[in-house]
Amino acid sequence: SKIKTPYIIYNSMLVKDENVALRGTATQSTRLLGNTNVLGIAINAIDGNRNSQMMAGSCTHTAQQADPWWRVDLLESYIIDHINIVNRGDCCAERINGAQIHIGDSADWSANPQAGTIDQLAAGDTYSRYYQRDVKGRYVTILIAGADKILSLCEVEGMEGLYVNVVIPGRIEFLTLCEVEVYGSKLD
Protein backbone atom coordinates (compact mmCIF):
# COMPACT_ATOMS: atom_id res chain seq x y z
CA SER A 1 0.00 0.00 0.00
CA LYS A 2 1.05 3.59 -0.57
CA ILE A 3 2.38 5.71 2.27
CA LYS A 4 0.65 9.08 2.25
CA THR A 5 2.86 12.04 3.07
CA PRO A 6 0.82 15.18 3.74
CA TYR A 7 2.25 18.65 3.69
CA ILE A 8 1.51 21.20 6.41
CA ILE A 9 2.00 24.96 6.15
CA TYR A 10 3.73 26.62 9.14
CA ASN A 11 4.20 30.39 9.01
CA SER A 12 4.02 30.40 5.18
CA MET A 13 6.59 27.61 4.93
CA LEU A 14 5.63 24.25 3.40
CA VAL A 15 6.80 21.34 5.56
CA LYS A 16 6.67 17.66 4.59
CA ASP A 17 5.12 15.65 7.42
CA GLU A 18 5.80 11.93 7.85
CA ASN A 19 3.57 9.29 9.45
CA VAL A 20 6.10 7.99 11.98
CA ALA A 21 3.68 5.33 13.26
CA LEU A 22 4.40 3.24 10.14
CA ARG A 23 7.88 2.47 11.53
CA GLY A 24 6.62 1.62 15.03
CA THR A 25 5.42 -1.54 16.74
CA ALA A 26 1.87 -1.96 18.05
CA THR A 27 0.34 -3.93 20.91
CA GLN A 28 -3.08 -4.08 22.58
CA SER A 29 -4.64 -5.33 25.82
CA THR A 30 -6.36 -8.39 24.25
CA ARG A 31 -7.34 -9.70 20.82
CA LEU A 32 -10.80 -10.77 19.68
CA LEU A 33 -11.06 -14.59 19.59
CA GLY A 34 -7.62 -15.06 21.11
CA ASN A 35 -4.27 -15.42 19.41
CA THR A 36 -5.41 -17.69 16.56
CA ASN A 37 -7.43 -15.02 14.72
CA VAL A 38 -5.47 -12.84 12.26
CA LEU A 39 -8.30 -10.30 12.20
CA GLY A 40 -8.04 -7.58 14.80
CA ILE A 41 -4.29 -7.70 15.47
CA ALA A 42 -2.68 -4.53 16.85
CA ILE A 43 -0.42 -3.80 13.87
CA ASN A 44 -3.47 -3.38 11.60
CA ALA A 45 -3.95 0.17 12.95
CA ILE A 46 -0.53 1.24 11.63
CA ASP A 47 -0.45 -0.61 8.30
CA GLY A 48 -1.10 2.54 6.21
CA ASN A 49 -4.51 1.23 5.09
CA ARG A 50 -7.49 3.42 6.08
CA ASN A 51 -10.12 0.79 5.13
CA SER A 52 -12.70 0.88 7.94
CA GLN A 53 -14.35 -2.49 7.23
CA MET A 54 -13.36 -5.01 9.91
CA MET A 55 -13.46 -8.05 7.60
CA ALA A 56 -11.06 -6.35 5.15
CA GLY A 57 -8.31 -7.09 7.67
CA SER A 58 -7.06 -3.58 8.42
CA CYS A 59 -8.67 -2.93 11.83
CA THR A 60 -7.71 -3.88 15.37
CA HIS A 61 -10.23 -5.47 17.75
CA THR A 62 -9.91 -6.29 21.45
CA ALA A 63 -12.03 -8.75 23.37
CA GLN A 64 -14.77 -7.19 25.48
CA GLN A 65 -13.09 -6.19 28.73
CA ALA A 66 -12.59 -3.47 31.31
CA ASP A 67 -10.34 -0.61 30.16
CA PRO A 68 -9.26 -1.93 26.73
CA TRP A 69 -6.20 -0.19 25.26
CA TRP A 70 -4.04 -0.06 22.14
CA ARG A 71 -0.47 1.31 21.96
CA VAL A 72 2.13 2.14 19.32
CA ASP A 73 5.80 2.31 20.28
CA LEU A 74 7.46 4.83 17.95
CA LEU A 75 10.85 3.28 18.95
CA GLU A 76 12.26 6.70 19.85
CA SER A 77 10.83 9.96 21.14
CA TYR A 78 9.19 12.38 18.67
CA ILE A 79 7.63 15.82 18.72
CA ILE A 80 4.07 15.10 17.57
CA ASP A 81 2.40 17.57 15.21
CA HIS A 82 -0.90 15.75 14.81
CA ILE A 83 -2.63 12.40 15.07
CA ASN A 84 -5.38 10.77 12.98
CA ILE A 85 -7.50 7.82 14.16
CA VAL A 86 -9.90 6.03 11.77
CA ASN A 87 -13.01 4.53 13.39
CA ARG A 88 -14.59 1.25 12.35
CA GLY A 89 -17.10 1.82 9.54
CA ASP A 90 -19.16 -1.37 9.22
CA CYS A 91 -20.73 -1.35 12.69
CA CYS A 92 -20.31 -0.46 16.34
CA ALA A 93 -19.05 3.11 15.80
CA GLU A 94 -20.17 4.18 19.28
CA ARG A 95 -17.68 1.87 20.99
CA ILE A 96 -14.84 4.38 20.53
CA ASN A 97 -16.76 7.22 22.20
CA GLY A 98 -14.91 8.40 25.30
CA ALA A 99 -11.57 6.91 24.25
CA GLN A 100 -8.55 8.68 25.72
CA ILE A 101 -5.27 9.31 23.93
CA HIS A 102 -2.09 9.33 26.03
CA ILE A 103 1.35 10.26 24.67
CA GLY A 104 4.67 10.09 26.46
CA ASP A 105 7.89 8.20 27.10
CA SER A 106 6.50 5.51 29.43
CA ALA A 107 5.14 2.16 28.21
CA ASP A 108 2.60 2.50 31.07
CA TRP A 109 -0.17 4.68 29.61
CA SER A 110 -1.24 5.96 33.05
CA ALA A 111 2.20 7.57 33.49
CA ASN A 112 1.80 9.59 30.25
CA PRO A 113 -0.23 12.81 29.93
CA GLN A 114 -3.64 12.66 28.29
CA ALA A 115 -3.40 14.30 24.86
CA GLY A 116 -7.02 14.07 23.72
CA THR A 117 -10.43 12.44 24.08
CA ILE A 118 -12.64 11.09 21.31
CA ASP A 119 -16.03 12.35 22.51
CA GLN A 120 -18.02 11.05 19.54
CA LEU A 121 -16.99 9.67 16.14
CA ALA A 122 -19.27 8.41 13.36
CA ALA A 123 -18.75 5.10 11.57
CA GLY A 124 -15.73 5.21 9.26
CA ASP A 125 -14.87 8.81 10.21
CA THR A 126 -11.42 10.07 11.16
CA TYR A 127 -10.61 11.82 14.45
CA SER A 128 -7.87 14.40 13.81
CA ARG A 129 -6.07 16.31 16.55
CA TYR A 130 -3.47 19.01 15.85
CA TYR A 131 -1.13 20.11 18.61
CA GLN A 132 -0.07 23.74 19.02
CA ARG A 133 2.17 23.05 21.97
CA ASP A 134 5.10 20.70 22.21
CA VAL A 135 3.70 17.21 22.67
CA LYS A 136 6.51 14.68 22.98
CA GLY A 137 6.93 10.99 23.56
CA ARG A 138 7.70 7.50 22.37
CA TYR A 139 4.37 5.82 23.14
CA VAL A 140 0.85 6.70 21.95
CA THR A 141 -1.89 4.76 23.81
CA ILE A 142 -5.65 4.77 23.12
CA LEU A 143 -7.82 3.62 26.08
CA ILE A 144 -11.55 3.18 26.72
CA ALA A 145 -12.10 3.30 30.49
CA GLY A 146 -14.81 1.22 32.11
CA ALA A 147 -16.30 -2.25 32.26
CA ASP A 148 -17.46 -4.38 29.28
CA LYS A 149 -15.71 -2.31 26.57
CA ILE A 150 -14.27 -3.19 23.16
CA LEU A 151 -11.62 -1.16 21.31
CA SER A 152 -11.41 -1.35 17.53
CA LEU A 153 -9.17 0.95 15.43
CA CYS A 154 -8.82 1.08 11.66
CA GLU A 155 -5.80 3.43 11.45
CA VAL A 156 -3.78 5.58 13.83
CA GLU A 157 -1.54 8.26 12.34
CA GLY A 158 0.91 10.74 13.87
CA MET A 159 2.56 14.33 18.61
CA GLU A 160 5.92 14.32 20.42
CA GLY A 161 6.41 11.08 22.15
CA LEU A 162 7.82 7.62 22.24
CA TYR A 163 4.49 5.86 22.90
CA VAL A 164 0.94 6.57 21.69
CA ASN A 165 -1.83 4.89 23.75
CA VAL A 166 -5.58 4.64 23.03
CA VAL A 167 -7.59 3.64 26.13
CA ILE A 168 -11.32 3.29 26.93
CA PRO A 169 -11.28 3.93 30.70
CA GLY A 170 -13.97 2.99 33.22
CA ARG A 171 -16.15 0.51 31.33
CA ILE A 172 -16.05 -3.01 29.85
CA GLU A 173 -15.96 -2.56 26.07
CA PHE A 174 -14.43 -3.78 22.82
CA LEU A 175 -11.76 -1.56 21.24
CA THR A 176 -11.55 -1.54 17.43
CA LEU A 177 -9.19 0.78 15.53
CA CYS A 178 -8.93 0.87 11.73
CA GLU A 179 -5.92 3.18 11.32
CA VAL A 180 -3.77 5.34 13.57
CA GLU A 181 -1.41 7.87 11.96
CA VAL A 182 1.16 9.82 13.99
CA TYR A 183 2.96 12.74 12.33
CA GLY A 184 6.03 14.33 13.82
CA SER A 185 9.76 14.83 13.82
CA LYS A 186 12.64 13.30 15.78
CA LEU A 187 13.84 15.08 18.88
CA ASP A 188 17.31 16.56 18.52
Image (tube, rainbow, N blue to C red):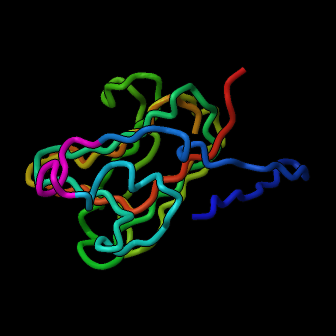
Q: Is residue 140 left or right of residue 54?
A: right
Front position in the image: 26 or 85: 26
Q: Main secondary structure of the magenta part?
A: loop
> Which residue is found at the position 64% from the left and 36% from the top?
133
> Which residue is found at the position 55% from the left and 25% from the top?
76
> Which residue is found at the position 32% from the left and 40% from the top?
27
Residue 124, above or below 120: below
Residue positioned most to the bottom: 90
Magenta region: which residues? 28-37
Q: Quadrant of residue 175?
A: bottom left
The quarter of the picture where the N terminus appears is bottom right
Q: Is residue 53 left or right of residue 76?
A: left
Q: Is residue 35 magenta?
A: yes
Residue 21 image position (x, y, % from top left): 53, 44
Q: Is residue 64 magenta?
A: no
The quarter of the picture where the C terminus appears is top right
Residue 41 image position (x, y, % from top left): 29, 52
Residue 63, above or below 184: below
Residue 169 image position (x, y, % from top left): 22, 44
Residue 65 image position (x, y, % from top left): 10, 49
Q: Is residue 57 left or right of residue 85?
A: left
